[in-house]
Amino acid sequence: MSMIHSFLDSLFETGELEIAANSSESGAADDDIPIRKAIQRYESLWRMQQPLEPPKFNVAAALKAATIFRSACEAVVYRRIEAELIEHLIRKTALVSGDDPRLHYSVDLVFHFLPQVVERAARVSESDPLLEVMRTVGRQWPLSSVGISGCEPQAIPAALRHVSLWRMYIYQIISRKDKSRLNIPLVREAVAAAIGPFPHLAPEFSSLS
Protein backbone atom coordinates (compact mmCIF):
# COMPACT_ATOMS: atom_id res chain seq x y z
CA MET A 1 0.00 0.00 0.00
CA SER A 2 1.37 3.43 -0.94
CA MET A 3 2.11 6.07 1.69
CA ILE A 4 -0.66 8.42 0.61
CA HIS A 5 -3.05 5.47 0.51
CA SER A 6 -2.12 4.62 4.10
CA PHE A 7 -2.49 8.27 5.05
CA LEU A 8 -6.01 8.42 3.60
CA ASP A 9 -6.98 5.13 5.23
CA SER A 10 -6.03 6.52 8.62
CA LEU A 11 -7.65 9.87 7.94
CA PHE A 12 -11.01 8.51 6.81
CA GLU A 13 -11.25 5.61 9.25
CA THR A 14 -10.07 7.34 12.43
CA GLY A 15 -10.05 11.05 11.66
CA GLU A 16 -6.43 11.16 12.80
CA LEU A 17 -3.60 12.83 10.90
CA GLU A 18 -1.02 10.06 10.55
CA ILE A 19 2.21 10.78 8.65
CA ALA A 20 4.92 8.16 8.26
CA ALA A 21 8.39 9.37 9.22
CA ASN A 22 9.83 8.27 5.87
CA SER A 23 6.98 9.65 3.73
CA SER A 24 7.82 11.63 0.61
CA GLU A 25 7.21 15.33 0.48
CA SER A 26 4.86 15.43 -2.47
CA GLY A 27 3.51 11.93 -2.88
CA ALA A 28 4.14 12.28 -6.60
CA ALA A 29 5.59 8.80 -6.88
CA ASP A 30 2.44 7.14 -5.59
CA ASP A 31 0.31 5.20 -8.07
CA ASP A 32 -2.96 7.10 -8.16
CA ILE A 33 -5.14 4.23 -9.50
CA PRO A 34 -5.61 2.43 -6.14
CA ILE A 35 -5.78 5.81 -4.44
CA ARG A 36 -8.63 6.84 -6.75
CA LYS A 37 -10.43 3.61 -5.95
CA ALA A 38 -9.97 4.18 -2.23
CA ILE A 39 -11.25 7.76 -2.48
CA GLN A 40 -14.30 6.61 -4.42
CA ARG A 41 -15.00 3.95 -1.81
CA TYR A 42 -14.75 6.43 1.06
CA GLU A 43 -16.93 8.94 -0.80
CA SER A 44 -19.69 6.39 -1.33
CA LEU A 45 -19.87 5.91 2.44
CA TRP A 46 -19.50 9.60 3.23
CA ARG A 47 -22.25 10.50 0.75
CA MET A 48 -24.79 8.49 2.72
CA GLN A 49 -24.14 10.71 5.75
CA GLN A 50 -24.90 13.95 3.91
CA PRO A 51 -28.30 15.66 3.68
CA LEU A 52 -30.50 15.22 0.62
CA GLU A 53 -28.62 14.46 -2.61
CA PRO A 54 -25.07 15.82 -2.79
CA PRO A 55 -23.58 16.88 -6.15
CA LYS A 56 -21.88 14.40 -8.40
CA PHE A 57 -18.45 13.40 -7.13
CA ASN A 58 -15.31 14.50 -8.98
CA VAL A 59 -12.59 12.03 -8.02
CA ALA A 60 -9.85 14.01 -9.80
CA ALA A 61 -10.59 17.09 -7.69
CA ALA A 62 -10.61 15.01 -4.51
CA LEU A 63 -7.26 13.46 -5.44
CA LYS A 64 -5.75 16.92 -5.96
CA ALA A 65 -7.12 18.01 -2.60
CA ALA A 66 -5.64 14.90 -0.98
CA THR A 67 -2.21 15.68 -2.46
CA ILE A 68 -2.28 19.24 -1.13
CA PHE A 69 -3.67 18.20 2.24
CA ARG A 70 -1.13 15.46 2.84
CA SER A 71 1.79 17.77 2.10
CA ALA A 72 0.33 20.42 4.42
CA CYS A 73 0.10 17.79 7.16
CA GLU A 74 3.73 16.81 6.58
CA ALA A 75 4.77 20.44 6.86
CA VAL A 76 2.93 20.85 10.16
CA VAL A 77 4.13 17.59 11.70
CA TYR A 78 7.74 17.47 10.57
CA ARG A 79 8.50 21.05 9.47
CA ARG A 80 10.40 19.71 6.49
CA ILE A 81 8.42 21.64 3.92
CA GLU A 82 8.49 25.41 3.67
CA ALA A 83 5.29 27.38 3.09
CA GLU A 84 6.63 28.45 -0.31
CA LEU A 85 6.83 24.81 -1.41
CA ILE A 86 3.21 24.22 -0.38
CA GLU A 87 2.19 27.30 -2.37
CA HIS A 88 4.10 25.92 -5.35
CA LEU A 89 2.34 22.56 -4.98
CA ILE A 90 -1.05 24.27 -4.87
CA ARG A 91 -0.27 26.15 -8.09
CA LYS A 92 1.09 23.00 -9.72
CA THR A 93 -1.96 21.00 -8.71
CA ALA A 94 -4.16 23.69 -10.31
CA LEU A 95 -7.09 23.07 -7.99
CA VAL A 96 -9.35 26.10 -8.48
CA SER A 97 -12.71 26.51 -6.76
CA GLY A 98 -15.12 28.53 -8.90
CA ASP A 99 -18.90 28.14 -8.63
CA ASP A 100 -19.25 24.44 -9.43
CA PRO A 101 -20.96 22.65 -6.48
CA ARG A 102 -19.41 19.36 -7.61
CA LEU A 103 -15.90 20.67 -6.94
CA HIS A 104 -16.77 22.05 -3.51
CA TYR A 105 -18.40 18.80 -2.49
CA SER A 106 -15.57 16.67 -3.87
CA VAL A 107 -12.68 18.48 -2.21
CA ASP A 108 -14.58 18.61 1.08
CA LEU A 109 -14.15 14.85 1.37
CA VAL A 110 -10.56 15.65 2.37
CA PHE A 111 -10.54 19.37 3.10
CA HIS A 112 -13.17 19.13 5.85
CA PHE A 113 -10.23 17.99 7.99
CA LEU A 114 -8.39 21.26 7.21
CA PRO A 115 -9.47 23.05 10.43
CA GLN A 116 -7.71 20.33 12.45
CA VAL A 117 -4.45 21.00 10.62
CA VAL A 118 -4.76 24.76 11.06
CA GLU A 119 -5.47 24.32 14.77
CA ARG A 120 -2.45 22.07 15.17
CA ALA A 121 -0.18 24.51 13.33
CA ALA A 122 -1.50 27.44 15.38
CA ARG A 123 -0.68 25.64 18.62
CA VAL A 124 2.95 25.54 17.54
CA SER A 125 3.16 29.13 16.30
CA GLU A 126 0.55 31.73 15.38
CA SER A 127 3.17 33.34 13.14
CA ASP A 128 3.81 30.21 11.09
CA PRO A 129 3.71 31.21 7.38
CA LEU A 130 2.00 27.91 6.66
CA LEU A 131 -1.09 29.17 8.50
CA GLU A 132 -1.70 31.91 5.95
CA VAL A 133 -1.17 29.44 3.10
CA MET A 134 -3.86 27.17 4.55
CA ARG A 135 -6.17 30.12 5.17
CA THR A 136 -5.74 31.08 1.52
CA VAL A 137 -6.89 27.57 0.61
CA GLY A 138 -9.75 27.90 3.08
CA ARG A 139 -10.99 31.11 1.50
CA GLN A 140 -11.35 29.29 -1.81
CA TRP A 141 -13.32 26.46 -0.21
CA PRO A 142 -15.76 28.00 2.32
CA LEU A 143 -17.62 24.74 2.94
CA SER A 144 -14.41 23.09 4.15
CA SER A 145 -12.97 26.00 6.11
CA VAL A 146 -15.75 26.52 8.65
CA GLY A 147 -13.97 26.91 11.98
CA ILE A 148 -10.87 28.59 10.54
CA SER A 149 -10.57 32.26 11.49
CA GLY A 150 -10.01 34.68 8.65
CA CYS A 151 -11.82 32.55 6.05
CA GLU A 152 -15.40 33.73 6.43
CA PRO A 153 -16.94 34.85 3.11
CA GLN A 154 -18.64 38.23 2.82
CA ALA A 155 -21.40 36.84 0.62
CA ILE A 156 -22.87 33.41 0.08
CA PRO A 157 -20.76 31.65 -2.57
CA ALA A 158 -22.81 30.50 -5.53
CA ALA A 159 -21.72 26.88 -5.07
CA LEU A 160 -23.19 26.76 -1.57
CA ARG A 161 -26.65 27.56 -2.90
CA HIS A 162 -26.88 23.90 -3.85
CA VAL A 163 -29.50 22.56 -1.42
CA SER A 164 -27.34 19.74 -0.06
CA LEU A 165 -24.18 21.85 0.29
CA TRP A 166 -26.19 24.59 1.99
CA ARG A 167 -27.39 22.18 4.65
CA MET A 168 -23.88 20.80 5.04
CA TYR A 169 -22.58 24.33 5.47
CA ILE A 170 -25.13 25.26 8.15
CA TYR A 171 -24.47 22.01 10.01
CA GLN A 172 -20.72 22.68 9.95
CA ILE A 173 -21.24 26.17 11.37
CA ILE A 174 -23.25 24.78 14.26
CA SER A 175 -21.05 21.75 14.97
CA ARG A 176 -17.83 23.77 14.81
CA LYS A 177 -19.34 26.69 16.75
CA ASP A 178 -18.15 29.16 14.13
CA LYS A 179 -20.02 32.35 14.98
CA SER A 180 -17.91 34.33 12.52
CA ARG A 181 -20.00 32.83 9.68
CA LEU A 182 -23.09 34.62 11.01
CA ASN A 183 -21.94 37.86 9.36
CA ILE A 184 -24.34 37.10 6.48
CA PRO A 185 -28.03 37.56 7.47
CA LEU A 186 -29.26 34.58 5.44
CA VAL A 187 -26.73 32.32 7.12
CA ARG A 188 -27.72 33.68 10.51
CA GLU A 189 -31.38 32.96 9.76
CA ALA A 190 -30.61 29.45 8.54
CA VAL A 191 -28.59 28.63 11.66
CA ALA A 192 -31.41 29.92 13.87
CA ALA A 193 -33.94 27.83 11.94
CA ALA A 194 -31.77 24.71 12.18
CA ILE A 195 -31.44 25.09 15.95
CA GLY A 196 -35.18 25.77 16.25
CA PRO A 197 -36.70 25.22 19.69
CA PHE A 198 -33.58 23.51 21.04
CA PRO A 199 -31.12 26.37 21.74
CA HIS A 200 -29.74 24.44 24.73
CA LEU A 201 -28.15 22.04 22.24
CA ALA A 202 -26.10 24.89 20.74
CA PRO A 203 -25.61 27.42 23.58
CA GLU A 204 -22.97 29.27 21.56
CA PHE A 205 -25.79 30.51 19.34
CA SER A 206 -28.28 31.30 22.11
CA SER A 207 -28.38 34.95 21.05
CA LEU A 208 -30.20 33.90 17.87
CA SER A 209 -33.28 32.69 19.72
Image: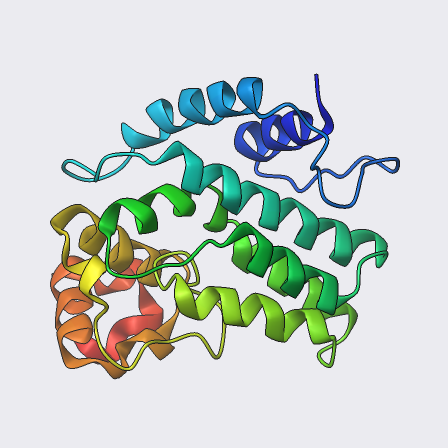
- Of the 4 image quadrants, the one containing the C terminus is bottom left
Figure quadrant of residue 204: bottom left
Q: Position of residue 148 (x, y in %)?
A: 49, 69
Q: Is residue 197 in view from this perspective?
A: no
Q: Is residue 61 left or right of residue 173?
A: right
Front-lying residue, 100 or 196? 100
Residue visible at 54% across and 55% down in the picture:
114
Residue visible at 47% across and 65% down in the picture:
138
Front-lying residue, 34 or 127? 34
Q: Position of residue 182 (x, y in %)?
A: 27, 77
Residue visible at 21% across and 71% down in the picture:
156
Q: On screen, 176 above or below 13? A: below
Q: Is residue 132 in view from this perspective?
A: yes
Front-lying residue, 57 or 118? 57
- Of the 4 image quadrants, the one containing the N terminus is top right
Front-lying residue, 118 or 197? 118
Q: Position of residue 199 (x, y in %)?
A: 22, 65
Number of numbered markers: 0
Figure quadrant of residue 16: top right
Q: Is residue 164 left or right of residue 4?
A: left
Q: Is residue 79 left or right of residue 3?
A: right
Figure quadrant of residue 130: bottom right
